Image (spheres, rainbow, N blue to C red):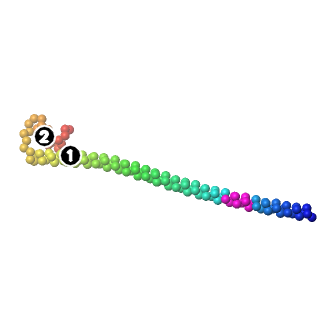
Amino acid sequence: MEEMQAQTQMNRTKMLLETERVKEHARAEAASAEIKIHADLMEESSTIEAKAQEKEVLSNAEVIKLEAMAEKEATRNLAAKRKHELDLHEKRILLGLSEKGNFNLVGTSGDRLVNAMMTGSLMRR
């Protein structure tokens, strides 16, 4: 009888230990799954953030490229505008000289002045 009671007590203890082992194993798996899910979410969040930053940087690069092209074009147009303004100023000077000037047009300087009046420019061409 005592042997049977001891056997029963041993079986009960084995069952309790097995139950505790299974519970502990389930807790560990749940904790592991929670950590894995958290890590996966962080990875996905980081990936999305990195892609957004990449798009932003590429957009900023495109803006800089377009601004540089606009500045280049503006510089080219400004040079043409300044040349045109210089030509107009030169023609105004020649107009003033031709309207009010009383010159002795002899020699090289006279030839230059006549040539400037004819071509509309004081520069040699």
Q: Read off the residue under disc 2.
A: 113
**Do residues under tags 2 and 1 come within 8 Å of each other at their CB atoms?**
no
Give 34 or 83, whichever is nearer the viewer: 34
Left or right: where 4 falls relative to 38 = right
Q: Residue at x 85, y 61 (%)?
A: 10
At 14% across and 40% down in the image, what residue appears?
Answer: 115
Toward the top, the furthest residue is: 107
Vertically, is 122 above or below 55? above
> In the image, which disc is placed on residue 71?
none
15 vs 71, left or right, is right
Query: Callout 1: helix, strand or loop?
Result: helix
Instruction: Please identify the quadrant where the C terminus is shown.
Output: top left
Who comes first in sequence, dot 2 or dot 1? Answer: 1
Which one is in front, 32 or 67? Answer: 32
Q: In the visual, does 106 lie left or right of 39?
A: left
Q: Which residue is mark 1?
A: 87
